[in-house]
Image (tube, rainbow, N blue to C red):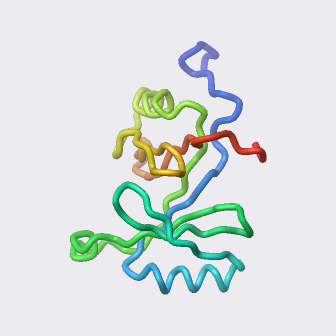
Amino acid sequence: MNGDEKTTVPARAGGVRWADLATGDPDRAAAFYCALFGWKAHEHRANGGTLTKLCRGTDPVASIYRLSKMQLQQGIPSHWTPYMGVPDLEAAARRAEALGGTVLVAPFAVDGMARIALILDPVGAAMGLWQDDAPRSRD
């Protein structure tokens, strides 16, 4: 890195903010993780669908959603997607592309939660970018 403005990383970027579990059996997965970590599961409606929000106490930490029938037929296994926090989602998505990554899912809002995008890094690993709807006190 040469220190110019195009390579400057915002001070608050990069911490793990969230994780999604995509699975064919959300109820079984929720029961497992709630028993393992003491999390509580709550139904959350967003973007015309339903997901299971997992909370540590009152603090939401992850979610579970059902893989589609087509994904299951294609043999896509259950998998976790980590989301790294960014202060400006659109700028982070552009930066990922400028650095050789690919934006798989363009930035969009998840009702009542955050704005997210999914990227593929230059070596083929997928991850999410997460911009909070409102600032979190733990930052």
Q: Residue furthest right?
A: 138
| On-image quarter of the N terminus | top right
Location of residue 25 by image quarter: bottom left
**Residue in the picture at 44% in, 63% down:** 45
Find residue 103 and report its horizontal and vertical position in percent. 37, 40
Q: How many marks?
A: 0
Residue 33 position within the rendered picture, expressed as x and y whole percent measured from the top left: 61, 79
Query: Where is 82 relative to 85, above or below?
Result: below
Q: Quadrant of residue 10?
A: top right
Who's the residue at 59% across and 75% down the image? 41
Compare residues 47 and 31 and report the one nearer the observer: 47
The C terminus is located in which quarter?
A: top right
Instruction: Tell me the residue at 42%/47% (across/down).
Output: 118
Q: Position of residue 113 (x, y in %)?
A: 54, 51
Residue 15 % position (x, y):
67, 46
Q: Residue 11 is drawn in which quadrant?
A: top right
Q: Identify which residue, 35 or 76, lies in the foreground.
A: 35
Q: Residue at x 70, y 78 (%)?
A: 37
Above or below for 27 versus 139: below
Answer left or right for 96 relative to 47: right
Judge by depth and name the residue closer to the eye, 135 or 116. Answer: 135
Left or right: 23, with 139 as reference point: left
